[in-house]
Image (tube, grey):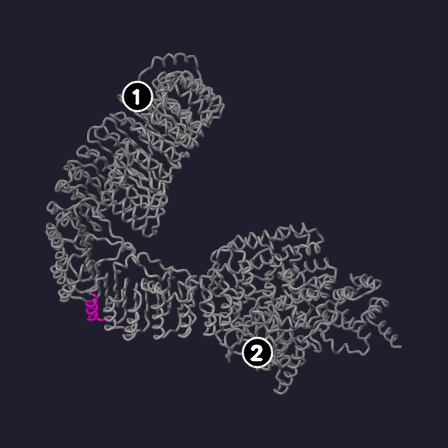
Amino acid sequence: MMHQEARAGLLMDPISLQLDTENLCGCLVRLLSKDPEWLSAKVKFFLPNMDLGSGDQSPDPTQRVIQQLNKLHTQGQTTWQEFIHCVCMELDVPLDLEVPLLSTWGHGDGFPRQPEVGEESQPDSQLHPGLKRPHQSCGSSPRPKQCKKQQQELAKRYLQLLRTSAQQRYADRTPGPGQPLAFPQAYIPPILQWSRASAPFDTQEGAITGDPKAEDGTDVNIRDLFNTKANRGPRVTVLLGKAGMGKTTLAHRLCQKWADGQLDRFQALFLFEFRQLNLITGFLTLPQLLFDLYLRPEAGPEAVFQYLEENANGILLIFDGLDEIFHPCSSKETAGPEDPASALTLFSRLCRGTLLPGCWVMATSRPGKLPACLPTEAATVHMWGFDGPRVEEYVSRFFSDQPSQEAAVAELRTNRRLWSMCAVPALCRVACLCLYRLLPGSSPGQSAALLPTMTQNYVQMVLTLSPRGFLPAESLLGLGEVALRGLETGKVIFSAGDIPPPVMAFGAALGLMTSFCVCTGPGHQETGYAFTHVSLQEFFAALHLMASPQVDKDTLSQHVTLTSRWVQRTKARLGLLDHLPTFLAGLASCACRPFLSLLAQQDEAWVGTKQAAVVQALRKLATRRLTGPKVVELCHCVGETQAPELAGFTAQSLPHQMPFHNFLLTYADLAALTNILGHRDAPIHLDFEGCPLEPRCPEALAGCGQVENLSFKSRKCGDAFAEALSRSLPTMGSLKKLGLAGSKITAQGISHLVQALPLCPQLEEISFRDNQLKDWEVLNVVEVLPCLPRLRKLELSLSNVSASTLLSLTNVAVTCPTVRMLQVRKADLIFLLSPPTETATELQGDPDLQGNANQRKEAQRRSLALRLQKCQLGVHDVEVLIAQLREGPHLDEVDLSGNRLEDEGCQLMAEAAPQLHIAGKLDLSSNGLSLAGVCRVLSAVSTCRTLAEFHVSLLHKTVVLKFAPEPEEQEVTQKRAAFPDSLTFQTPSDPPLCAPRIRLTHCALQAQHLEHLCKALGGSCCLCHLDLSGNALGDKGAALLAQLLPGVGALQSLNLSENGLSLDAVFSLTQCFSTLPWLLHLDFSSESQRVILRGDGRDRDLLAAGSLPEFQAGAQFLGFGQRRISRSFCLRECQLEPLSLSRLCETLEKCPGPLEVKLSCNVLSDQSLETLLHHLPRLPELSLLQLTQMELSPRSPLLLADIFSLCPRVQKVDLRSLHHATLHFRSSEEQEGGCCGRFTGCGLSQEHVEPLCWLLSKCEDLSQLDLSANLLGDAGLRCLLECLPQVPISGSLDLSHNGISQESVLCLVETLPSCPRVREASVNLGSKQSFWIHFSRQEEARKTLRLSECSFEPEHVPRLATGLSQALWLTELTLTQCFVGLEQLTILLGLLKCPEGLLTLRVEEPWVGKAGVLTLLEVCAQASGNVTEISISETQQQLCIQLEFPHQENPEAVALRLAHCDLGTHHSLLARQLMETCARLRQLSLSQVNLCEASALLLQSLLLSLSELKNFRLTSSCVSSNGLAHLTSGLSHCHHLEELDLSNNQLGEEGTKVLTGSLEDKCWLKRLDLSHLPLGGSTLAALTQGLSHMTLLQSLRLSRSDIGDVGCCHLSKALRAATSLEELGLSHNQIGDTGAQNLAAVLPGLPELRKIDLSANGIGPAGGARLAECLPLCRRLEELMLGCNALGDPTALGLARGLPRHLRVLHLPSSHLGPEGALSLVQALDRCPHMEEIRLAENNLAGGVPHFRLGLPLLRQIDLVSCEIDNQTAKPLTASFVLCPALEEIMLSWNLLGDEAAAELARVLPRMGRLKRVDLEKNRITAYGAWLLAEGLAQGSGIQVIRLWNNPIPPDMAQRLQSQEPRLDFAFFDNQPQVPQGT
């Protein structure tokens, strides 16, 4: 009966009525009635937000099934299809039922149109179960007035409704038997840690560890999240945690606890997910957000909202997934708080308190840059996941039976990597799920092989959930495609249409996807689907990329990227790809290959190709310079691959210094990093600064032996962190430097670290800076110093230490034998230590070693530096300190500045100083010392024999005493190792001073104090420097001091600056030149009040302090020469009136000399200048007078020009720009010589020319005159040229930069005949604007004129030709870029008719390189004289013609011209004209030309007529084959050729063979050059045959001609006939030992041989030895070049036994010479007095550096580049240089020379008068060595440049050195200006 009723009900079911499938529906109902629990679970899955309690309570099970199916069917086609697929997949459905189900409903056939979910026709009940939707949204109507009681009643009902809804949503649910994930859903509270917040929490700051063993409902720590002291304003908490840490789970947990009444402080709780809020595109009000999107009241929404506003402090709003927001929010908002806005804006208003003021807001987010809408006072809580106890507790909850629990925990403990992965709760659940499958059938420890990585855990999870023995590949790939498409489009919530029904059914069946109600706006809802976790979506996306055939390798590689964790949330897409590269890397593991092969249904080779692409992409990433976050992500990826080779490559690619700054790090991150570092060989430094760190993070570093430096700096590190760190430190055997700064550790954390530190004996540096340690903690840490034998530094800065503790620390520093420095400043507390010489093993092995005699002796030898600055120490504290120090070691430094010692305490320290053995300084500054106390302290230290300096400045509160070490301590002090720290005190590198330096500056001393002061100073022994600057002595004090100084003793310097002195005081002090023998320099500056009196000592510490002394011309330095000691007087910034100058000169007349006077003032009048010049003859000792930085009148050049006649001792006058004038004087011993006058930039014009020339005509011998940079112009120049014969110039005249034009050039040409002593003139009117005229003492028979960039116009050419024709003795004219074109040159050649003689015309114009040989020869044919030489170079754009006047005919040329009379072609006419003009041509040179056939044909005709042609050159040119034939034909008729140069032409072997055919019958040939021509077998045979007839041959050059050893053999035979040969060049031919031996047999038969070049020929020791045997027989040999051959010492020894006496040049660079061979060779060179050039570069000379005894008087150049020469060998080398007076260039670059070598060079520079250049590049010379070289240059050396590039000299110091001595060149390129020709 009941069955029939059910049947009738089923027939009336709407499904049956709509589909007319009665039988099929009945079968479905019967099937589902057997498993009602499964059906209920599925209905809950597909209808997550529908109330299923009230409508499904029918007593009839069949009717209940029909009702549930009806609800599913009304959801639409997609939902019904997915449900049918779940039925067929998950239940045991008969095949005869499964086929009709899928065919009827599985594909949408026959399904009528239903209203889609989300449309307006959707039932209202779907918004929230049991609630009735009103007609209007609550935000659209005004709030009605209601009574208070009614409001409370409505609110009470709504709050109860909220709790009921929360209980239904978040109550504990155990999956039914229909779900595969039927495991207990245990909740274990994670680790929470507070971060900094402006509103402090009641709970103690630190980690909330919770109670992992507490039962559900008793976890009270979650309540602490809302314990804040903020009573007003927003109460915002941000919960930060990485993906999988359980943020969403915690949010649900809070909802559950609130629903159960455990969070009683909150009346209402709302939970929103940003991933759902992102779907809302419109604007909302807050009531719409709360009621329309969460839960709507049954009635009175306005009243309920009003109640919520009034009780806002009891409302909690949780926003999950803050990092998933689409659009960024602004921190500024202009709209009103009640206006509709986006969901994120509403969240911002809630956080800022503009909505629901006083409510509680909690947001969860992944770490990164949080939105700007969060208030700054928001509290931050970090979620760290699970620690060890929590992992074990979770496992015990997951497994129901005790054996499984114990087995699972044992597996985790044995698998360290799996244990570290379980720190992430989501991974912990996956691991437990995998262990649930693996444990029953596996042996213990198998998880290490099956679950080594996160990816393989996920793989095992998929295998666990899949049916046994079956892998649903198609469904997995479909799910992966959905996942990837979602990630790429930023989608984590899918609609029903996004997922195919079979895939949805599969995901639901395996519990991989979840469903829920999604509200896209008020009144719009639909069902959404998502993966159970975002990481699961990433895993399936990775599966699709790896296994899908549609994804190629390039696309796959593009997804292997590293994203920074410094997230800038500015893009509209979610950061959903964080773990995708990690999963791709994990799937690239070899262990995943079978799984992927099965999934992709491809062979393993196909899978391996994709895996290799991922590994290769990771390898490329490892080579990049990555930031800290990307390095951590890379370590995760590489660890997932399980590829040891990739891990090793990544580990080695990491930089030595690895910083990690400002991003969150977990235990798993450091575990991944440690795993990779395990494959590294080199040490690494890890620096963590500002990183939120999980408290147990350091445990991951346990056993990491590669970490050498480890540093943590974060306020988030507390005692728990310190405890974890203390457990790992003893296991890190390579750790040398440990830093834990800026943390929150207390005494508890320090105690853990102190217990661990003795177990780390290898530590060298420890820093506990900025930890606010108290007295007990500081002393506790210091106690471990004796236990750390290698410790070098301990820093405890920013600790709170009392005075008593400070004295305890000084006692530790005194008694501990390894302490070298203790520095306690206002914030600093630092120990520097120096480990003893014994090894750490010895120290640990013998505990009694600390008390034995050896260590006591070490303690006595050690020295200590003590710095106790600003420590509030008083007199009593000093007494205690002195008592400690008297029993302690010697002291390097004691710094007590900034304390409260006052006069008594300072005196106590000064009196105790001699007994304290202070070797450095005692600093008592800022201790309240008075003027009376200064005298007491000075008296106390006056008898101290080790006092080096005493400096007191009461104005600056400075009191510093410096001491020199005891003599027996100096050696120990100099050998002491430097501290590896910037705080290390500086010990002077020079020997300590033997006499004190007293500095009493700014002490208000007056004249009445001087007598007492000098009396006290007179008792001081050997006072060197006295500084009284900054006092009030005045003129009276200066005069008194001048009388008292002889009684003080011999000083080195006296400083009287800033004492109010005037010129009268200077006159008083000037008298000291004659009364004080030590006084050599007096420097006075009026405006800056600088007054310095000093002797000759120049301290190196001036250079070290950054101040360079000025280089005095002629100053005595390091024993230079035997000159008399020079004195200098410098007066600056003074008003120099005539009376003052007269008085000054009268005072200086008594000064012993030589004397240098330097004067500087603003304006010097003509009267003052005349007065000064008038007194010069009365100063016989004056050697230099400088007038600098002053303004002179335009008449001053004339006054200075007259000085040559007034004072014959004047050698040089240099006046520049009317601001700087220098006069050099001859000494009485020097012979008279030429004078030099320089008047540059003085504004001289035409009116000054005549008087100036008249004054200069009085000078007997004017060698040089420089009038450049004036205003002469054309008129002034013409006037000067007219007066020039009156001026006795014997050297050069410089008229550059005077504004001249072409008129002046033509005037110069016209004036040349009237100036018989002019030998050369050069003018450049271009950018250089140079104008030089060079003279001879006698009339010059040969004159040279060079004109450049003169821009001649056509009308200038006739005048130029006329002037040149009248210029007698003009022999050379050069026109460079003067705009002389082809036509103008033709005119010039035609008009140029000199009386007689030779004239060489050289034209350098751009058109010359383009005109061609034919055109240029046509130009030459127009010359009016005989052309004797023609030289053409197209590349150099140069045409050179030598003309002979007058024109004469050659009879042979006339006959040849007549022979061509019958030819009427242009070629014949040109040939006839050339034959006439070039009848006497002796030399024809064509270089770098392109010789066409026509040109070659013309040359052939011309060569036939040149009976006097002696020299023919065709070099570096290109000749056609036909042209080559013509040229060869012409050359074959030149039988009288004496020189033939055919080198470097672009000819092949055939062309060379044709050209060598012209060598026949050249019996008169003397010089032959065929270099760079391929001389093959037949060509060389023809050459050797021709050589046998050249008996007069003197020079043969065949370099780079591919001769080889065989060719050399044939050539050697042919050379036997060349008995006149003087030069043989065979370099770069690879003739080898065989060729060298053949040559050696021939060389003795060449008696005239003077030069042989065999460089770069691959000659070894055998060939070299044979050459060395025969070369002594070449008695006239002058040049020997054997470089770039591996000759070795045997060849050098052989050469040394018989070097030809007339040898001038020796080249042996890169010859593999050693010290023995070089030394023997040098000794042999000492017997070659004609030697001019030696090149021994790139040989290992070392001890074989040239050391001549007899000297080489003609040696001009020596090259010793890169010969490993050091300071030790520099002294004999420089001594050898002195024996070579003709040396011009010394090359010593790329050696090991330091300051000692520079000092040796500086000594000899003044004695080498011809030296022009010294190359010291790439050595070890410091600024001091460069200063020494500059001093050497100042002695009058003629050196033009000293190259010092790439020496260890700071750029600023190099610039200052070069500014004072421009000849020092520190640049990479040699930028020294070229000296003008003729100087």
Q: Which amino acid does label 2 sit on?
A: Arg
Q: Which amino acid does label 1 sit on?
A: Glu
Judge left or right: residue 402 versus residue 946.
Answer: right
Q: For mark 2, what is the residue?
A: 223
Give the Cα separation between the discs numbered 2 and 1. Answer: 116 Å
Front residue of 827/339: it is 827
Q: Is mark 2 on a helix, strand or loop?
A: helix
Q: For mark 1, what is the residue?
A: 1444
The N terminus, quarter of image:
bottom right
Front residue of 74/1117: it is 1117
Residue 965: mark: none
Q: What stretch is highlighted in magenta?
A: 928-941
Residue 933 magenta: yes
Q: Is residue 1108 above or below residue 307?
A: above
Q: Residues within 10 Å of mark 1 (few under 14, many from 20)?
A: many
Q: Is residue 1428 above or below residue 409?
A: above
Question: What percent of the width, then of the height, locates residue 45?
Answer: 72, 70
Question: What percent of the width, then of the height, locates residue 1522?
Answer: 48, 21
- Is the stretch drawn in magenta largely helix, strand or loop? helix
Judge left or right: residue 598 versus residue 579.
Answer: right
Q: How crowded is mark 2: few (under 14 residues within 10 Å), some or many (20 or more)?
A: few
Residue 1629 shows in this picture: no
Front residue of 349/499: it is 499
Question: What percent of the width, then of the height, locates residue 1829?
Answer: 28, 46
Question: What percent of the width, then of the height, locates residue 1592?
Answer: 36, 18
Residue 466 magenta: no
